[in-house]
Amino acid sequence: MANLTSRSFGSDNHAGVHPAVLAAIAAANKGDAIAYGDDEISSAAQARLCEAAGARRAYFVFNGTAANILGLSLLLRPYEAVICAESSHLNVDECGAAERLLGCKLLPVQSPDGKLTPALIESRLTGLGDEHRAQPRVVQIAQVTELGTCYSLVELKKISEYCRSHGLLMYIDGARLANAAAYLGCALADIAGHADVLSFGGTKNGALGVEAVLVMSDVVAEGGQYHRKQLLQLASKMRFLSAQVSALLDNDLWLQNARQANAMAQRLAAAISAEEGIRLAYPMQSNGVFAELDRERIALLQRDWNLHIWSEAANGRCVVRLMTAFDSTEQDIDELAEAISKTKCFT
Amino acid sequence: MANLTSRSFGSDNHAGVHPAVLAAIAAANKGDAIAYGDDEISSAAQARLCEAAGARRAYFVFNGTAANILGLSLLLRPYEAVICAESSHLNVDECGAAERLLGCKLLPVQSPDGKLTPALIESRLTGLGDEHRAQPRVVQIAQVTELGTCYSLVELKKISEYCRSHGLLMYIDGARLANAAAYLGCALADIAGHADVLSFGGTKNGALGVEAVLVMSDVVAEGGQYHRKQLLQLASKMRFLSAQVSALLDNDLWLQNARQANAMAQRLAAAISAEEGIRLAYPMQSNGVFAELDRERIALLQRDWNLHIWSEAANGRCVVRLMTAFDSTEQDIDELAEAISKTKCFT
Amino acid sequence: MANLTSRSFGSDNHAGVHPAVLAAIAAANKGDAIAYGDDEISSAAQARLCEAAGARRAYFVFNGTAANILGLSLLLRPYEAVICAESSHLNVDECGAAERLLGCKLLPVQSPDGKLTPALIESRLTGLGDEHRAQPRVVQIAQVTELGTCYSLVELKKISEYCRSHGLLMYIDGARLANAAAYLGCALADIAGHADVLSFGGTKNGALGVEAVLVMSDVVAEGGQYHRKQLLQLASKMRFLSAQVSALLDNDLWLQNARQANAMAQRLAAAISAEEGIRLAYPMQSNGVFAELDRERIALLQRDWNLHIWSEAANGRCVVRLMTAFDSTEQDIDELAEAISKTKCFT
Amino acid sequence: MANLTSRSFGSDNHAGVHPAVLAAIAAANKGDAIAYGDDEISSAAQARLCEAAGARRAYFVFNGTAANILGLSLLLRPYEAVICAESSHLNVDECGAAERLLGCKLLPVQSPDGKLTPALIESRLTGLGDEHRAQPRVVQIAQVTELGTCYSLVELKKISEYCRSHGLLMYIDGARLANAAAYLGCALADIAGHADVLSFGGTKNGALGVEAVLVMSDVVAEGGQYHRKQLLQLASKMRFLSAQVSALLDNDLWLQNARQANAMAQRLAAAISAEEGIRLAYPMQSNGVFAELDRERIALLQRDWNLHIWSEAANGRCVVRLMTAFDSTEQDIDELAEAISKTKCFT
């Protein structure tokens, strides 16, 4: 419960708010405004984000789990199921919100790198038309995944084509969509175009707290405003969520922020992957470095650093997740890399 | 969708953020902090609010509907029902969130002034022990009510005693709890002590967006953290919600804000209630003035002012709801009162 | 918990099973049959009932509450609400199943005779398009109502026309649909044609336990088999439910049964309504006699008879509900009427 | 959709009703009886079954999925999860009813023989106390399992001890509990004593359609009657469900029926397991024979026999599930065995 004195690599949620976002919030605090999003700041932010992503509708919500639940609520009937990666945030880290709030069944698939493929999806396409089975309807992927990996545009295309030819809908959890776009060097719309609904995460990207649910067609968006309200996501002073989105869109701040986070993760990976006794667990494709090392070294590091142990590996080793953020600096990275290096003697 | 050029009396959600709250948010933006509330700002804010209200646990959430749903989720089993006023926010203005997210039945009671009494509660205490009936378990009241009325401490005591002697639990929707405390001249704890769970609204009181669910006993709070997460209310960068609460607690800013709003509503009521053709629909006990006047006068006023028509009355008259906020000024009030007065000739 | 020695007038569920229904169950017990309704008895029963009602699909379920919940599940999205009579079985006697299982809000309307009208429906058509309000979508009526009253075909037409012109769907709770058809002298299809979905009750009509959900269009029926399974209504040995339906359809046994019950109720009403101190509370339009009399007389009768006190009336009087069944005899009626008459001296 | 002309081995649900059960239904059809279980037949059947199983409460419901859902509803809070076998009926064959109706998350475990062990359970005991994770609370096993295997009493003891020492509750899906007791040669209570709640299946055991939810303590049973009603399982003419239970209890008919089914499965297994090209996929411990053979042989058999292909195996082979029932005869078995033998030349 103590404040952190060194830079945290435990989560990209440990970072604060980008100064431009805070400034936009302050600037929005002029006079009165209609509540619940019926104000100019909100309509402008929605329109700008929709344009950037090629979306028809944008709903701003409070956090990433809420974005996933609202997004899926637009796609599912009560008897339909969601195919997702076993390791997905939806399946693991949302306290069963999908089951409780949507009543839907998740059909998790083991995936070594957190990514789905048409073959993995097909493995759960069973019992179609059988009234004893929840009917697979939505394929949920994350871009980037919980393991820091990123679908290429070709991989996305294969999945979306598979979905469309098999009567499936596609949802993308984009809590770190900015990092994916930065890594792929593509536009938001290049990714969004493959989805029926997706989220765009602001919070890990430098916002105080805002995520967007982007809906790619009017038909799917029908009734979305009621779902948002029922799912406890309608902000009364919406302008202050919208102002955050606008600030991230100004001068492509979202992209700058993501590039910085990604670059710092690359720097960290480069520094430590050469170390003896350290192995990167997954390909480096965003702002997370998943490094496998001895448990003793991790314990030593945790005296001074906030690190998140991701999973256990063989031989008493663990995978530690090192997250960078929009405001990570080269100095931050170098200090951590040096600290990691110093634990070498203990292996 | 246009920005408001004059002061809005349509809702106390139309106001912006109190400067001290914005400053506290900015001040919280120093360095990294553990996410999800495990930071010093959050633990301090929770402790301070609990102390002020005599509560055992405080969960910060994003909005008032969420506070109501989370609060009720701590009190209800799946087959239990909630007795509430027909006019309550829970019943009318939450898009059926209680039914969808909690699956509970509401048992609404007609109430002329928005308040429940033991007699009104008793009218819905039927079918106890009958397996064909949802079992009444929670009495939900709002302090202040949707009609701007306020329970006296004696009235609260009668209800809470009735509840305790009839196996009922009590939930208070405190979206405007500050206004009630200011009106009654009592401490938060004086009201909270009557409830099992209650909410404390920050947003209408000058916050950017934060409400608290206050739980008065450890037993009831059990599992609350999971409910909060499942109900999509766990903020990752929690410190920025907590900082708002702390700012409202500093120097009793919450009380100053509520007093100012209440005083301005009193000033407005005093000014217009003497007007010919205007009648106050409900007792003036908080920051809302419910005034009945001719529809034509309202239409004229709406050319320049944002006003919310609350309900239709007899003889082509309507009740208009005029809300003041923490930042309403005497000048705001006097301008509106003058404008209202000017419409007199049209009646 | 004692077996009943005299005829019960407490409920039409107190009767047993019609001999022809039992015989049909026994006849169906020949050899093996595919489970879950994929057998000849089931397909025949479904087809026959659909033809009788002009329906496209028939789902057999276990009880009346289940029929209502399954039927409504075909018509509602999560944010939609159901307009129904305050006194409806759905609102009062289903333990909040609609709220728990469908998550929908009920919008009850006070109705003196248990029937809705376009004007009563319109009184709840508020907040359309307002995201803070659950959206009225289904009008639920019962034919016959909980108060034993019956919509005329003209009344049904007015409601269904109102629904269609206002974007509303119509569900009829037909737990006693047979009694209505018998009273009106019309075909099942004459009633069913006004609904989008309706139920047809077998249990009160002489079955052991079966109700049908009738869907009037293929579009609405889509996915119905999954809803039925999820809602715990898919019988494995379905042929034994289907055989009951077939037995009721043979030689219009359902109609004979309903006519007998209705006639006996008429006989009872005629006998007692002439009595001093007895008043019929509602028009006699089916198999229930709602008689208002002094509490003392009821208490005396309850020594020997199973009667259900429906509600309290003024001046220490109560309304008692006297239900007849398919197997009520003239002797049963005359005995009860005589018993009631004998209590006269105590008033 | 054709009636079956030969004996079906596709499911033990394809059998009809045991004559003694039908006779009991007919015998219950005497006079009127209070509805909803408040009759003598029902109270007697509940008491007798409770005594046989050492249970405190018995709720009769319509089918096996309903029994599972009602049973689990007594054990779970909204944020709690159920550990179960990946292959369990609950996870695979109930159309997501647990997720939709209870909102709970299932935590499935791969198990080669359909059985859980303390080690397998422990593999899902992660994230305890972590608000981002649904909290494991109930261990759900089936006795017998979907793969026809049966826990020994020692295995059950190990699981129940593990549960009790880890704060977990135990639910047993006993759709074929009778077959397990027959196989183990133990009393129902010997199995039931390990559970907090369990079901006892009547339907596959010769009933027309009834299952019981058995609750082993009063505390857990609290509110069960409301859950049953809400979950659409309260039969109005309950005596006809209760009479089935009583018939099965008379002279241990349930045990005779289970022994017959088990013995016929053993006879079948003995006959075919010696055949070249046939392998039993799982240990033979109840009334199901899971035989792996060439797909061509299965196709030939399916011309004359109703068989259920359970799963695909390697080398173009399949596992076929052959279920016997209470009324399977030696002649039935010998005819099938001979037919299977005759397909040998095609391999």
Image (cartoon, coloured by chain):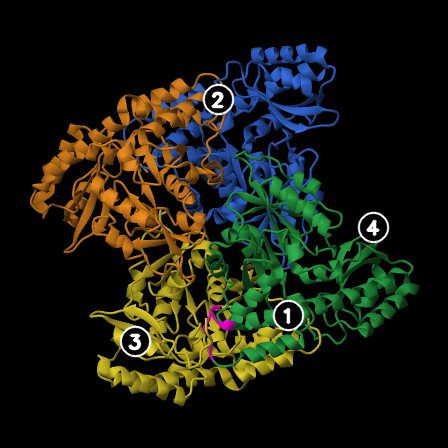
Chain colours: A orange, B blue, C green, D yellow
Q: Chain of mark 3?
A: D
Disc 4 to disc 3, C-alpha distance: 74 Å
Q: Nearer the viewer, residue A6 or D126?
A: D126
Q: Are marks 1 and 2 on the same chain?
A: no
Disc 2 marks which amino acid? Met
Range of magenta residues:
C32-40
Q: Nearer the viewer, residue D46 or B247?
A: D46
Q: Are marks 1 and 3 in contact (CB under 8 Å)?
A: no
Residue where numbered disc 4 is placed: C314
Q: Are marks 4 and 1 in contact (CB under 8 Å)?
A: no
- Label 4 neighbour load within 10 Å: few <14, some 14-19, many 20+: few
Q: Which mark is drawn over residue A192? A: none
Tell us which disc is closer to us: 4 or 2: 2
Disc 4 to disc 2, C-alpha distance: 55 Å
Which is the main secondary structure of the residues drawn in magenta?
loop
Residue B201 in the image: above or below residue C247: above
Residue where numbered disc 1 is placed: C248
Expressed as whole percent of the image width and height from the top left, the position of residue C278 reads 87, 58
Q: Are marks 4 and 1 on the same chain?
A: yes
Tell us which disc is closer to us: 3 or 2: 3
Q: Chain of mark 2?
A: B
Expressed as whole percent of the image width and height from the top left, the position of residue B101 reads 49, 46
Residue drawn at 74 percent across, 55 percent down: C149
Disc 3 marks which amino acid? Ile
Query: For numbered disc 3, what is the local secondary structure?
Result: helix
- Label 1 neighbour load within 10 Å: few <14, some 14-19, many 20+: many
Disc 1 to disc 2, C-alpha distance: 61 Å
